Image (spheres, rainbow, N blue to C red):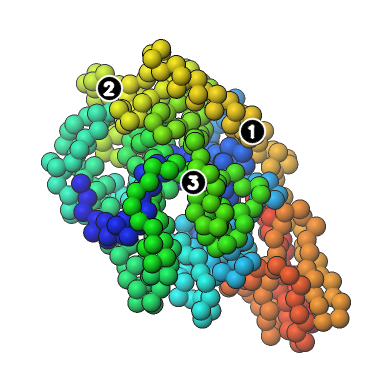
Amino acid sequence: TAKTPTLDKLAKESMVYTNAYATVGVCAPTRSAIITGMYPTSIGTMHMRTGNDVMSWGKRVYKNDIEVNRNDLEGNPIRQYAAVIPDDVKCFPEYLRANGYYCTNNQKTDYQFAAPITAWDENNNKAHWRNRPKNSPFFSVFNIGLTHESRIWKHAEKPLTVDPETVKVAPYYQDTEISRTDIARHYSNIELMDKEVAKIIAQLKEDGLYDNTIIFFYSDHGGPLPRQKRAIYDSGLHVPFFVKAVNSKTKGKTDRMISFVDLAPTILSLANIKPISYMQGKAFLGAYNEKPREFIYGSSDRFDGVTDRLRAVRDQRFLYVWNYYPDKLKYKDIGYRKQVPMMIEMLSLKDQNKLNKIQMQWFKTKTKEELYDSENDPDNIVNIIDDPKYNDELNKLRNAFFKHQQQYVDLGMLPEEKLINMMWPDFKQPQTSVPKMKQKGSIITLSCDTKGASIAYKISDKPNEKFDYNDHWKLYTKPLTFQSGKYYYVIAERIGYKESETVILKM
């Protein structure tokens, strides 16, 4: 296994959550859940991926269906797009900013929409709490990409720091030199990541902030290897997760169930901000800590050019899966992961009939329902759906699934082409209306006719300055006080819409 001295020490000073789960076994849909506190299926962000808004403020360019070459479940060609989520839903750091927090993200976003200018004070590869105004409270996110799936092949020439002979090989993998090397490569990448975490912690300590800072550590989905990433099983959804409290007051382990939809309300709760009523997650820490959840919910829809639809419910012990298309293979033939050497080898061995029964399960069609005892079968290999001994557990989870589907809209039920046309009428991205200004005496009020739009502004001494998104725009939260001779640059943006034109106002 990997040696992680930094994380080991941090874990000893933290509460370790052993039952924490992503909403989807891949980054972008899950990251949309983290940033909004909403299930991806309920806001239309469940497909991987909508566009190229992966880093910082996003590329904000969306190719049409001819260029993209992918289809929905009905065979309709689909274009790139930015998900237009419900108009009352915001990126939760906006609420922290409104309450005086300096918010930074370094630098992956990948929310299925371009990060709005109002979400972050800084959002790039230099974003850091050290850039905040003196003594301001801060919320900072650092996304470390060293353990990403792509690093299995991109780091192929780097020295291994973990011996392939010592790694554990899951029963759903072929036990070969190639498999062991890829697993050892991932563990070696984890060791590199541990060193990056050490640098961030060292900076907190240098600044005298470590003891007074709450630290969350987690991955944005389960493992990066085949039958882990993109899987709806525990290998795809179960994540490492721990929280260091102020002065490490709460330490130990808990089996309390955590879903990534719980992160947004929890962070607001820790800042003594009441979680916003639309949020579907539950705060598990802070002033608004809620009753522990009984179930977590997962989903699986389109991954790149391969479309399916699965839903999952998990309690403390059992995992239940509902397959809408049982005739489709569990395995998804996704080109991106066929760059992983063990995936290439696995496909070759399959074609040669050299995989065993357990390894071949992944290449079979599905049953309508699946049930796994994760306590005794952590790899989710033995489907006990037809075992009458587990009828009570099956009925409990099945009922929880139906109740969840009734409680929240599931936009994955729509063909993606139709969903896109709902968000982008006539498949064209809507644009946020130009913000308006009213002046009464020394007070300036800003507004926007686009429902759900947020407004950002800058104050300058100069006309016609060229600002970009990295120029520290301020979030508009209340009327501004008139400053004579100043120029006000104002922009509005609703999530999923094109940002408004920038308005320049001279006072």
**From the viewer's perspective, is the residue at label 3 or at label 2 nearer?**
3
Measured from the top left, where is residue 151 in percent x and y? 31, 50
First in residue order: circle 1 vs circle 2? 2
Is 167 rendered above or below residue 385? below
Q: In the image, which disc is placed on residue 260?
A: 3
Identified at 32% across, 60% down, the residue is 13
**Circles 1 and 3: CB atoms closer than 8 Å:** no
Residue 182 is left or right of residue 316, and the answer is left
Q: Residue furthest bottom?
A: 485
Identity of the residue drawn at 57% across and 41% down: 39
Q: Is residue 235 among what the camera can see?
A: yes
Query: Mark 3 is on which residue type?
Result: Phe
The answer to the question of whether label 1 and label 2 lie on touching residues, with beta carbons closer than 8 A, is no
Instruction: Identify the secondary structure beneath mark 3.
Output: helix
Q: In the rendered image, which residue does mark 1 sit on?
A: 407
Q: CA distance from mark 3 to mark 2?
A: 30 Å
User: Viewer-nearest of labels 1 and 2?
Assistant: 1
Circle 2 residue: 358
* Relative horizontal placement of residue 58, taking residue 167 as reference (left or right): right
